[in-house]
Amino acid sequence: MSINKLLPYSSALEMIEKVANQHSINLNQTCELGNSTSRLLAEDIFSPINVPSFNNSAMDGFAVQTHIVNQAIEKSGKITLKVSGSIQAGDCQDINAGSEHLAWEIMTGAPVPNLFDGVIQIENVSINEVDGNKTITLTEPVQKGRNIRKLGTDYKTNEIVAYKHAIIQSQHIMALATVGIKKINVIKKVRIAILSTGNELAKKSSTSLNSGKIFNSNQPFLKAYSQNLNCDPVFVGRCNDTIEAFNALIDDALEEKVKIIFSTGAVSMGKFDFIPQALLARGAKIHFHKAKIRPGKPILFAELPNGVIYFGLPGNPIAAAAGMRFFVSPFIRQMLGLPQEKRLKAQVMADISKKKGFRTFAKALAFVNNSGKLCVEMLMDQGSYQSCSFAQSNCWLILPEESENIKKGELIDVAPMIPNLMVL
Ligand code: AMP
Ligand code: MG
């Protein structure tokens, strides 16, 4: 493939997926459940137990035998029962409730004794206590099973609790803890290196700018963003725009035993855009350079001779962000064996015009309107250097190549800022 030809996005994506398949990794590690927030579950997890593991009361009240109560109430309109004792949450579940026992005082979560099949709430009985002997009087029938949480009605043994590839969130942690899981197998993070090119980048510690300098925003962005993609990032530094300085950083990155290197800058057409040349000189294979997209056209995707993947992202921050979202994210998903994302569609709020032939990723704000429809507003200030509008966006609007004008009300693909890695 000629290096300087603009590749359509779909072909770039095909290449990304093909290369990712050749680099698929399947490394897991165990993780304490309590430390597993945001980790990717490596396998389906099934419940080792029934939950509840014993019938227990859903209310504070009295456990009764419903047939006795209901027969009496049908006959004479009420029944008074001797209360045999009190059962608390945490009490042993094997209470011997012989036939002489007619009612047990019972607390929420306490085991319901055998033969007892209904719990009447404390507020629905009148209680009488004489010389320590408690009785209750009921005037309404009690439905069989009332206020009893039956064994296995949350989880049955071997029922699925969490699916492989779920991003562990607090709701999964609750469910897994409920069935007694203490450790889980998660997909190992992918070790990646980030480096920044550009004479104009101020030193990391700089708090003010000398003439002609800018703060490095790509590096912290890439670090933060890659963490959403199950990556473990290391920043190897910034370099001036020389091949020697760049090569030194690549060597540092390789020493870190990373799987992927991300750089920003130095991939477009300028005099100091040396990365393609530097990579070729190192024996790298350039899978593609430049895609028919906006922003981020100069994106470069390569592979070093030792198999380390290289993403050369453009220097403009929004172009780098689009590269992470629409090239790197699908690569990592494929590499980890995750299914590719499904796109959401939203109604655009105004007419949009764009350059024909380019897949265009626009900073946008999605919201649900009063009729419950997902709508999307393309933000002003679409410049690839403009981070202010990016900070105000909550999604990307994905405008198709073929259109030049999109009409208000059309349904257009949107992508959340952070890819939804969830399968279910
Ligand atoms: P380049 O792709 O190297 O031509 O850079 C394109 C634009 O992105 C230039 O305006 C750079 O100053 C800017 N840029 C490059 N690297 C960074 C960075 N790490 N943080 C913020 N802006 C950058
Ligand atoms: Mg540059």
Image (tube, rainbow, N blue to C red):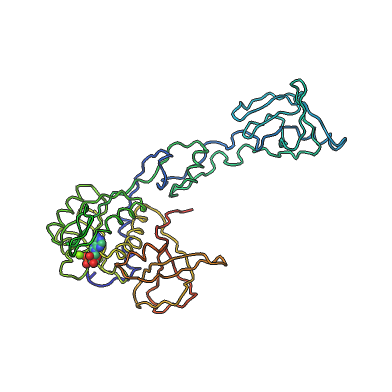
| Viewer-nearest residue: 371 or 38 | 371
Residue that extends furthest to the left in the rendered view of this protein:
244
Residue that extends furthest to the front in the rendered view of this protein:
208
- Residue plotted at (63% across, 31% down): 110
On the image, which quarter does residue 90 sit in?
top right
Q: Is residue 268 left or right of residue 52?
A: left
Q: Is residue 240 left or right of residue 29?
A: left
On the image, which quarter does residue 246 sit in?
bottom left
In this rendering, is residue 419 above or below 29? Answer: below
Query: Which image quarter has ligand 2?
Result: bottom left
Q: Is residue 27 left or right of residue 243?
A: right
Residue 1, position in %: x, y? 24, 69
In this rendering, is residue 90 above or below 271? Answer: above
- Residue plotted at (12% across, 58% down): 244
| Viewer-nearest residue: 21 or 47 | 47
In this rendering, is residue 268 above or below 66? Answer: below
| Viewer-nearest residue: 398 or 284 | 398
